[in-house]
Image: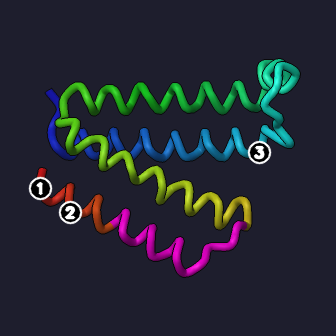
């Protein structure tokens, strides 16, 4: 059985890998249209398939944490994915981050901290 710190670490690793997968998928999908042709183009998109593979690898860490931890703790901690995506969007994609998004991110972090304190 895993200890509390192990569960937290595994969940944060899963969240970071999931965020990286989102970045890979964002960089791989351009002008997608919801159609049969669009679906076929997705199946041929190697970058997108890599992103999906990376995301699936994050599930290994997540499921490992979930197998020993409480769902009511692990899942909210996995919300740290939002923090990692926020950082990637800002520094790798150059996306602007406004006041409202910044405040929302702070609320997410505060929620994660509160949940972590109850474990």
Element type at mark 1 = loop
Q: Is residue 79 above or below residue 83?
A: above
| Percent coordinates x, y for residue 92 in the rendering | 70, 60
Give the magenta-colored segment's residue range: 95-109
Residue sitting at x 83%, y 19%: 36
Are circles 1 and 2 on residues that touch, CB within 8 Å?
yes
Element type at mark 3 = helix
Q: Is residue 8 above or below residue 53?
A: below
Q: Which residue is mark 3?
A: 27
Q: Which residue is mark 2?
A: 114
Q: Residues within 10 Å of mark 1 (few under 14, many from 20)?
A: few
Residue sitting at x 41%, y 42%: 13
Please check the rendered image and state whether residue 101 is part of the magenta-colored stretch, yes or no: yes
Marks 1 and 2, Cα distance to the nearest angstrom?
7 Å
Are circles 3 and 2 on residues that touch, CB within 8 Å?
no
Residue sitting at x 70%, y 39%: 25
Relative side of 49 to 111, left or right: right
Viewport quadrant of the N terminus: top left
Relative side of 118 to 100, left or right: left
């Amino acid at each position: 059985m895993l200890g509390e710190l192990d569960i937290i670490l595994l969940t944060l690793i899963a969240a970071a890998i999931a965020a990286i997968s989102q970045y890979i998928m964002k960089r791989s999908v351009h002008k997608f249209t919801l159609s049969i042709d669009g679906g076929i183009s997705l199946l041929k998109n190697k970058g997108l398939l890599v992103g999906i593979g990376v995301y699936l690898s994050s599930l290994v860490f997540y499921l490992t944490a979930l197998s020993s931890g409480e769902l009511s703790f692990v899942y909210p901690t996995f919300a740290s994915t939002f923090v990692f995506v926020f950082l990637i969007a800002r520094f790798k994609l150059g996306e602007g981050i406004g006041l409202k998004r910044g405040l929302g991110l702070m609320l997410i972090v505060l929620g994660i901290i509160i949940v972590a304190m109850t474990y």
